[in-house]
Amino acid sequence: MKADFDSWRNPLLDDFLRAIRFRSGLYFRPQFRAPWGISVARNCVVFHIVDQGNCWLEVNGMTEPMRLSEGDFVVVTRGEGHILRDRLSTPAADFFDLVKTHRFAENPTFRAGGKGSITTLVCGGAHLETGANDFLIGMLPPVLYVKRAEEGAQHWLGLTTEQILAELNSGGPGAKEIITRLADILFIRAVRAYFDHNIEAAESGRLLAVRDLQIGRALAMLHRHPQQAWTVDSIARHVALSRSAFAARFTELVGEPPLHYLTRLRIDVAAARLRSSDDKLRAIAAAAGYESVPAFAKSFKRLIGMTPGEYRRVA
């Protein structure tokens, strides 16, 4: 039974992970001396690596602060306001106000704080390539926390951190783009670790949608064949549910109706092809399940905010 379960679930999770790709973001290497505190709020994925020392993390909406140690990696998945500081009683200054006073454009490394013990961080923020990755973000908790000391994390987290630090220090051509690709790897690893530890225990929300025997299979079918002329009836028949029961359960777990999800998935597929190929729009539209270029272009602009041609030029 488990082998059959994994035969569709694992490819679905692979597809979610494969789609992770950040646009070029902002990256910093601040060094703080106690007492110090910073507040950060950004409408994107934000990550922090504790390169040296330790600190406390508090995230809006979470009741318990988290103690971060040297080498730990944390991702604030939806960019909620959060505070990092040496002690819970230390006041926090706006991080980006500090950045403005330290001529960041010339050097991503800056120093701030008092005269006490040192904590060095690597901080970054970036948007995912398309907004259609909202489903993936919705599967995740507000914070992903990978401890350097965890079995399995020691090797990959240490190596990737070293590479990011080398690029920040070099400031060479393409350094920002290299760091963005390394951030992709860090995020993929953190998400995969979260899936490994939590998917079997999921009892609600979008992670349960992937675990659910019928809704998970439906998602897997849509991801495997997004160009197919699916209807709610045809998907429901494939997973042995009535149309109404399937539509209600899919919407409850996924957060949107089946065909809305399919539309966003198709646009994701098309956006990836626009970024990676010179294929004509007609071929891209057909591969995404659209019978005409105008219908495809209209749907693409509605979801992405620009035409396919504009997207291709800036991607």
Image (tube, helix red, strand yellow):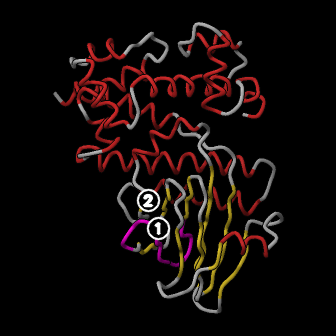
Between discs 2 and 1, the one toward the N terminus: 1
Measured as percent of width and height from the top left, residue 287 is found at 56, 13
Residue 305 falls in image quadrant: top right
Measured as percent of width and height from the top left, residue 44 is found at 59, 52
Please tell me whether mark 1 sits on a helix, a strand or a loop: strand
Q: Residue furthest bottom?
A: 115
Q: Is residue 73 magenta?
A: no
Label 2, label 1: how far apart the Cα atoms are? 8 Å
Measured as percent of width and height from the top left, residue 230 is found at 41, 13
Q: Residues within 10 Å of mark 2 (few under 14, many from 20)?
A: some
Q: Which residues are magenta?
A: 49-64
Q: Amino acid at mark 2?
A: Val
Along the line of sight, the residue nearer the viewer: 116 or 134:
134
Along the line of sight, the residue nearer the viewer: 108 or 281:
281
Tag 2 residue = 143
Q: Which quadrant is the N terminus positioned in?
A: top left
Residue 307 vertical placement versus 132 (above, below) = above
Please tell me whether mark 2 sits on a helix, a strand or a loop: strand
| Residue pictured at 42% horizontal, 33% vertical | 14
Q: Are marks 2 and 1 in contact (CB under 8 Å)?
A: yes
Q: Residues within 10 Å of mark 1 (few under 14, many from 20)?
A: many
Q: Is residue 59 magenta?
A: yes
Q: Which quadrant is the C terminus positioned in?
A: top right
| Residue pictured at 59% horizontal, 43% vertical | 128
Label for residue 59? 1
Residue 154 falls in image quadrant: bottom left
